[in-house]
Image (tube, helix red, strand yellow):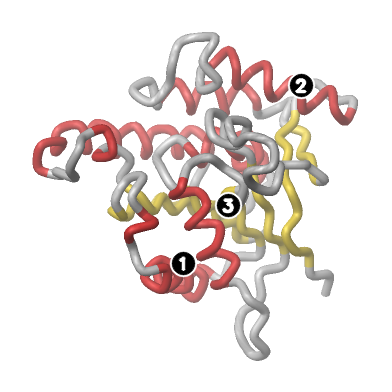
Amino acid sequence: MKTILVIAAHPDDEVLGCGGTMARHAAMGDNIHSAILAEGLTSRDKERNREFHSEEFMILQSAAQKANDILGVKQLKLFDFPDNRMDSMDRLDIVKVVEGLINELKPDIIYTHHIGDVNIDHRRIHEAVLTAVRPIPGNHHVEELLYFETASSTEWMTAGSAPPFIPNWYVDIEKTLELKLKALEAYAYEMREWPHARSIKALDYLAKWRGANIGVEAAEAFMLGRKIIK
């Protein structure tokens, strides 16, 4: 049994990036924890106004809990960093939250965002996680650090603007793809109609394409950040 920590920016990113893998971990008996750092709504306005979106927050938080329950997540933690404004925060404040999660949960494996995403929150979280998992002697060491792709962000970054997502780690999710798609359906408010990249149909196609990359029915692709073999 391993402890898994998924650190994502917005509600639905965790499912988009590694929902099938999360469900696979759950089926294997691993303990899965999700941490969603940004609130996911207020960037749609010119100025951040949490009060205005209070009812929508309740709907989104309920959807997040339902989606994570479908995947077999043991614990979901929701934070309230400003949506698409995390570059306005001191990086240390983000690092401290991630360090707190690591100290509390002592995860064996962390999944988080790729550095080359269009979304600024994804990039800030990637940087914070990388800082928090630095291998200081005497501290808890995360055994595996993996970066996932996020539909409608990773593939939207143009060539030469950031490091590309070139997967070198794949997880077979043939048996858990339906759970991933069901969890995405719980996030109906966040999903879009085909042919948007963040549509159920597109995510189904992506999983099957990633599966074809390695000769299986469906897969999720990652970039390995670090692997410690003990």
Which kind of residue does numbered mark 2 sit on?
Answer: Trp
Q: CA distance from mark 2 to mark 3?
A: 21 Å
Q: Residue furthest left?
A: 51
Q: Position of residue 167 (x, y in %)?
A: 78, 42
Earlier-in-chain disc, 2 versus 1: 1
Residue at left offset 24%, top offset 40%: 42
| Cβ atoms at labels 2 and 1 below 8 Å apart | no
Quadrant location of the C terminus in the rendered image: bottom right
Q: Quadrant of residue 181?
A: top right
Q: Which residue is mark 3?
A: 112
In this rendering, would 17 be left or right of 36? right
| Cβ atoms at labels 1 and 3 below 8 Å apart | no
Residue at left offset 40%, top offset 39%: 11
The crowding category of the residue bearing disc 2, from other C-alpha atoms within 10 Å (few below 14, some 14 to 19, many at least 20), is some
Q: Nearer the viewer, residue 117 or 205?
A: 117
Which kind of residue does numbered mark 3 sit on?
Answer: Thr
Q: Which residue is mark 2?
A: 209
Q: Which residue is mark 1?
A: 98
Q: Quadrant of residue 49?
A: top left
- Above or below 124: residue 116: above
Q: CA distance from mark 2 to mark 1?
A: 32 Å
